[in-house]
Image: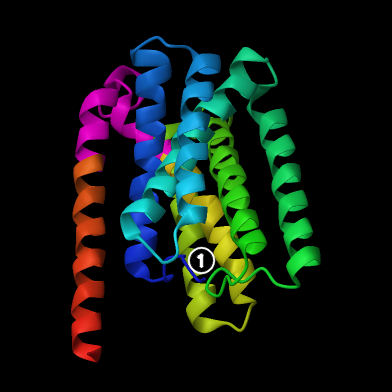
Amino acid sequence: MNKVAKVTLIFWIMKICATTLGETAGDLLSMTMKVGYAVSSLILISGFIVSLVAQLASKKMHPVLYWTVILTTSTAGTTMSDYMDRTLGLGYARGTLILISCLFVVLAAWRISEGSLSVSNIQTRKAELFYWIAILFSNTLGTALGDFLADNSGLGFMGGALVVGGVIALVALATYFTKLNRVMLFWIAFVLTRPFGATFGDLLTKTPAKGGLGYGTVGSSAILAIILVIFVSYTIHAEIRAKRSEA
């Protein structure tokens, strides 16, 4: 029943790549293609639901399917956050607080229902569903938090990415050198990699006049998609080699 990826260094690299791609691809659809936040959210949430149903229906771990769901939670989270913060006029600060509250509710319900928040040993359909809902909210939260750091805090895209990256580094050090709860550290890191991806995505796509590198949503999305495909292919081949060595 356990159909989630192992938490390794490669996992975190792929997570950052996927969430950054989600930021650029979401902006590509909503802003570059001028579809709008509301319609983009409906399209991308539909994509998330389809990929999630396929993931829940599968009988074993499929790296392509797993990372497709991660990517769709990221793209859907980008437009959902932008719709809340901009179209509904909640603003980045209030949007962030609302999403933090939603994430805490999901994690609390998961803990009460399953007795654990383990992300490495998920054995029930209910726990798997909680896992993906928590990921959706964490990625949506990350977009709002990343935009808040980049736009409202005065740090800018590079400053926001450096601050979040520094906190992620501290979490990594705590994982290796302290006895703090590993599940807690995982969810802190998982949430923080989303704003890192959001600010890094803005850094890639925005023009130099706005503090970015000017690659645009199309170019940035293409580069990130290629990198993600390479890493997914690597994990598939690594699993095949491992199975052959066990045979």
The image shows residue 33 at horizontal and vertical percentages of: 34, 12
Q: Residue at x 55, y 16 (%)?
A: 38
Q: Which residue is mark 1?
A: 170
Rendered position, 28 above or below 199: above
Rendered position, 11 above or below 223: below
Q: Residue 29 in magenta?
A: no
Q: Residue at x 78, y 64 (%)?
A: 113
What sort of colour scheme is used for the picture? rainbow
Q: How many marks?
A: 1
The image shows residue 15 at horizontal and vertical percentages of: 39, 54
Displayed quadrant of residue 93: top right
Q: Work out whether residue 222 can be spotted.
A: yes
Left or right, 185 with reference to 22: right
Q: Residue 215 in magenta?
A: yes
Q: Nearer the viewer, residue 231 or 172?
A: 231
Q: Nearer the viewer, residue 179 or 119?
A: 119
Residue furthest to the bottom: 246
**Most prominent secondary structure in the magenta stretch?**
helix
The image shows residue 77 at horizontal and vertical percentages of: 53, 35
Residue type, numbered disc 1: Leu
Q: Split into 4 quadrants, where in the image is the C terminus?
A: bottom left
Rendered position, 134 above or below 175: above
As helix, strand or loop, the secondary structure at mark 1 comes to helix
